[in-house]
Image (cartoon, rainbow, N blue to C red):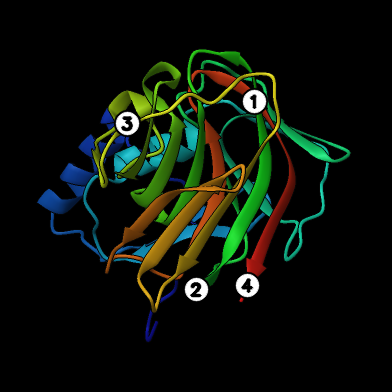
């Protein structure tokens, strides 16, 4: 910035911080902020210039929940992952989500994909819900979810979400809600394809095409895994760019 400087700032939405901000503005102290959210590994997760509404929900999404991440696993394009919610354990060739109370648990992968697919095998070990494939993930307030086994493992649908916190969630179902049961204790093959220029999303479970959705809101974005009231395991995770 010309004639200025930027630096990382700890976001504080407490009552005392809001009171101080109001007092500063009342005596004419003001500035347009450049704000960063920085992960524990030093990477910038999100950034914006100026004022942006509802920042408190973003802070809650990233920092108010206990998140654990153990181990290491290799992926086709990038081993870097962002565990946003839940208790994710990486064993030799498998990822496990072990917190059934994380509603939802979410794990985001690199890279950003414009045309390609996300492939994995999934198994539900315990709990009442299903698994979730996150796609079109651009930021915590804008992403899609292929909800496999929603409504206590009775439905399947494509949804658009505006938060990672299920306690304060607002989402819409983008396609027809259909009956579906994700059989527990068994490995199931999952594949999701995206084509931004073609505006198309397709999804397959055990080779059967169960999702086809065209949308102009598809952007170059990231994939992720998630669960809802479920302990689940994932393996053979691949992301392929065409």
Q: Residue furthest front?
A: 208
Of the residues under marks 3 and 1, which one precedes in the sequence? 3
Q: Which residue is mark 3?
A: 14
Of the residues under marks 1 and 4, which one precedes in the sequence? 1
CA gap, disc 3 to disc 4?
43 Å
Of the residues under marks 1 and 2, which one precedes in the sequence? 2
- What number is the disc on residue 241? 4
- What number is the disc on residue 114? 2
Dot 1 lies on which element? strand
CA gap, disc 2 to disc 4?
8 Å
Q: In the displayed structure, does residue 137 sit left or right of residue 121?
A: left
Relative vertical location of residue 207 with respect to residue 6 in this rendering, above or below: above
Dot 4 lies on which element? strand
Residue at 41 percent of width and 38 percent of height: 164
Residue 73 in sight here: yes
CA gap, disc 1 to disc 4?
26 Å
Q: Position of residue 175 (x, y in %)?
A: 27, 46
The reply to whether callout 1 and callout 4 are in contact (CB within 8 Å) is no
The reply to whether callout 2 and callout 4 are in contact (CB within 8 Å) is yes
State which mark lies toward you, 3 or 2. 2
Q: Residues within 10 Å of mark 3 (few under 14, many from 20)?
A: few
CA gap, disc 3 to disc 2?
39 Å
Residue 9 in sight here: no
CA gap, disc 1 to disc 2?
28 Å
């Amino acid at each position: 910035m010309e004639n200025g400087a930027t630096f990382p700032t700890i976001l504080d939405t407490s009552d005392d911080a809001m009171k101080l901000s109001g007092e500063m503005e009342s005596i004419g102290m003001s500035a347009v902020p450049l704000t960063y959210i920085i992960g524990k590994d030093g990477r910038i997760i999100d950034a914006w210039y100026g004022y942006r509404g509802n920042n408190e929900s973003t802070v809650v999404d990233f920092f108010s929940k206990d998140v654990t991440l153990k181990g290491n696993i290799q992926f086709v394009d990038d081993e870097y992952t962002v565990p946003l919610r839940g208790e994710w354990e990486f064993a030799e060739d498998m990822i496990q989500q072990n917190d059934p109370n994380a509603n939802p648990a979410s794990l985001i992968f690199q890279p950003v994909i414009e045309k390609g697919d996300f492939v994995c095998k999934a198994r539900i070990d315990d709990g009442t819900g299903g698994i979730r494939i996150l796609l079109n993930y651009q930021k915590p307030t804008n992403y899609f979810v292929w909800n496999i086994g929603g409504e206590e493992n009775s439905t399947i649908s494509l949804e658009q979400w505006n938060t990672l916190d299920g306690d304060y969630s607002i989402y819409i179902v983008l396609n027809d809600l259909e009956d579906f049961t994700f059989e527990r204790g068994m490995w199931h093959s999952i594949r999701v394809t995206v084509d931004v220029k073609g505006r198309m999303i397709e999804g397959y479970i055990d080779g059967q095409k169960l999702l086809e959705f065209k949308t102009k809101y598809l952007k170059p974005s990231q994939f992720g895994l998630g669960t809802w009231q479920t302990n689940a395991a994932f393996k053979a995770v691949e992301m392929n760019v065409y």
